[in-house]
Image (spheres, grey):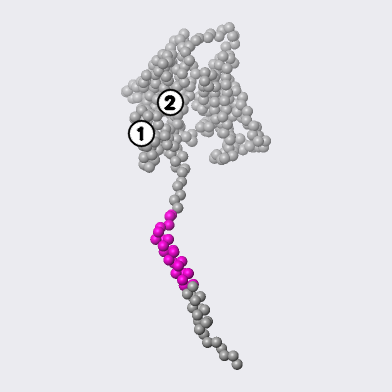
Amino acid sequence: MIAVSVDCKDTRIAVQVRTNKPFNGRIYALGRSETCNIDVINSDLFRLDLTMSGQDCNTQSVRDGFQTGIYSNTVVLQHHSVVMTKADKIYKVKCTYDMSSKNITFGMMPIRDPEMISITSAPEAPPPRIRILDSRSREVETVRIGDKLTFRIEIPEDTPYGIFARSCVAMAKDSKSTFQIIDDEGCPVDPSIFPSFTPDGNALQSIYEAFRFTESYGVIFQCNVKYCLGPCEPAVCEWGRESVESWGKRRRRSITNATEEKAEDMTLSQEILVLDFGDEKQSDFLKNDASIDFNEADKTVTIVEPCPTKTSVLVLGVTCALLVLIYISTIFCYYMKKWLSPRKMMP
């Protein structure tokens, strides 16, 4: 028996597990098995702390209708130290915080005197989303290495907010490999792989060629996105003698206007399946239906049974008839010989 409980702390989510017998294995955040985990050795009570900031544990800030302050993560309880088995358990954990409470600080100093709280009204910031488009501006989930794609971070057009993105990474689906594409300042790490963001209305976009990791077809993109009240100014990124603007840095503001900017990072993620050059058969399917899940298609096995031909049926019938005829002829000859043989004279 396994009992799992969740304790919502100010800056972390504590997941406590109690078992009825000593447990050996691992507990970790899904997609962050290397950076957010603990090894359990012969223990019946253990705890995993999921940080709510940064990317170590991939804790997501989610929205339920108009309710904010909801943080969610997925935890894996793995019985083996290396591989997953059907005995393992996956738990979805969630904490809902009262954003008006002074005790929820999220890394900032709490305000001790309620009378000192200043409330500023501002339009509600719409949730951004990531979309990956092909050369025909169609949203895609399965592509091939080298396909030209547009990576877009979008918010609705009718909003006073602007957005900027930074700390973007591409991860293998098994989370063993991670490649930073946009650094903490909002500049591209390797523009030949993933160029800088450029504005397109209220959206940010980067045109790149599809890539994947050696050991995984699935690529997960993750970005930290913040809001500006009004357009965001670009970061100036130096590449040798060339200066490149990237809309990954917020506009500089005075202290008096600091409240106009949304303080919380929003972590967005999007997954895409990248096939190899030689996957021509799968590529043909892709041309017909870009929504096909090739992982599922590959699991389908068709077994073809051989069908008998008319010639084989005819040969079988003739052979059976000859065998029956030989059998009847043998019996007939036996009795004829016996009937024609002279009978012995009685003395």
Residue at left offset 40%, top offset 59%: 310
Identify the secondary structure beneath mark 1. loop
Q: Farthest top residue?
A: 115
Q: CA distance from mark 1 to mark 2?
A: 18 Å
Query: How many neighbours does mark 2 have within 10 angstroms: few (below 14), some (14-19), or many (20 or more)?
Result: many
| Residue on which disc 1 sits | 147
The residue type indicated by label 2 comes to Ile
Residue 222 visible in this rendered orientation of the protein: yes
For the stretch drawn in magenta, the main secondary structure is: helix
Position of residue 180 in the picture relative to residue 20 (left or right): left
Q: Of marks 1 and 2, which one's residue comes earlier in the chain?
A: 2
Position of residue 259 in the picture relative to residue 241 (left or right): right
Magenta part of the chain: 306-327
Image mark for residue 130: 2
**Hey, which quadrant is residue 228 in on the image?**
top left
The residue type indicated by label 1 comes to Asp
**Hey, which quadrant is residue 237 in on the image?**
top left
Identify the secondary structure beneath mark 2. strand
- The vertical placement of 305 against 330, above or below, is above
The x, y position of residue 177, in whole percent, is 46, 34
Position of residue 182 in the picture relative to residue 29 (left or right): left
Image mark for residue 125: none
Q: Give the quadrant of the N terminus.
A: top right
The x, y position of residue 192, in whole percent, is 35, 30
- The vertical placement of 90 against 299, above or below, is above
The number of numbered badges drawn on the structure is: 2
Position of residue 146 in the picture relative to residue 117 (left or right): left
Residue at left offset 51%, top offset 75%: 331
- Residue 235 colored magenta? no
The x, y position of residue 46, in whole percent, is 63, 31
